[in-house]
Image (spheres, helix red, strand yellow):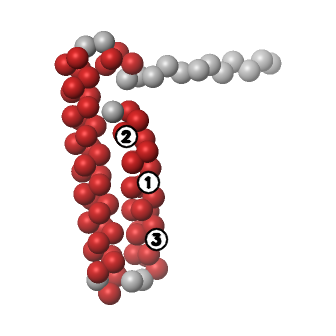
């Protein structure tokens, strides 16, 4: 049995043909990026400021928010 893996092509490649689609793609991803930054920033500041939220569950939620900031800050700007 042979390995039949192939390199997948990007689904966003057709957006590079038309300038209007490029701008739509850019603004859409910018909006998603800013919304994710705002949401994770609110989670981080809320957990950091409120002493009642310094429990293990919120500690892990804080770590997930930091991870999401890192992931989205590397993936989304490359696609824009």
Camera-nearest residue between 4 and 23: 23
Mark 2 neighbour density, 10 Å: few (under 14) some (14–19) many (20 or more): some
Give the residue at mark 1.
70
Q: Which image quadrant for residue 47? A: bottom left
- Residue under label 3, please give it: 60
Q: Quadrant of residue 2?
A: top right
Q: Quote the CA–CA distance across marks 2 and 1.
A: 10 Å
Please provide percent x and percent y for residue 30. Answer: 25, 40
Q: Which quadrant does the N terminus fall into?
A: top right
Nearer-N-terminus badge (3/2): 3
Q: Residues within 10 Å of mark 3 (few under 14, many from 20)?
A: few
Which image quadrant is residue 49 in? bottom left
> Is there CB contact under 8 Å for labels 3 and 2?
no
> Quick one: label 3 or label 1, which is nearer the N terminus?
3
The residue positioned 25% from the left and 57% from the top of the image is 38
Vertical placement of 73 versus 54: above or below? above
- Work out whether 25 lies above or below 71: above
Say whether residue 77 is left or right of residue 7.
left
Mark toward the viewer: 3 or 1: 1
- Residue 47 is left or right of residue 19, and the answer is right
């Amino acid at each position: 049995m042979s390995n039949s893996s192939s390199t997948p092509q990007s689904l966003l490649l057709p957006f590079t043909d038309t300038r209007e689609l490029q701008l739509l793609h850019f603004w859409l991803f910018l909006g998603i990026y800013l919304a994710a930054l705002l949401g994770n920033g609110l989670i981080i500041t809320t957990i950091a400021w409120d002493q009642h939220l310094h429990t293990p569950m919120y500690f892990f939620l804080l770590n997930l928010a930091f991870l999401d900031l890192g992931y989205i800050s590397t993936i989304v700007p490359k696609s824009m």
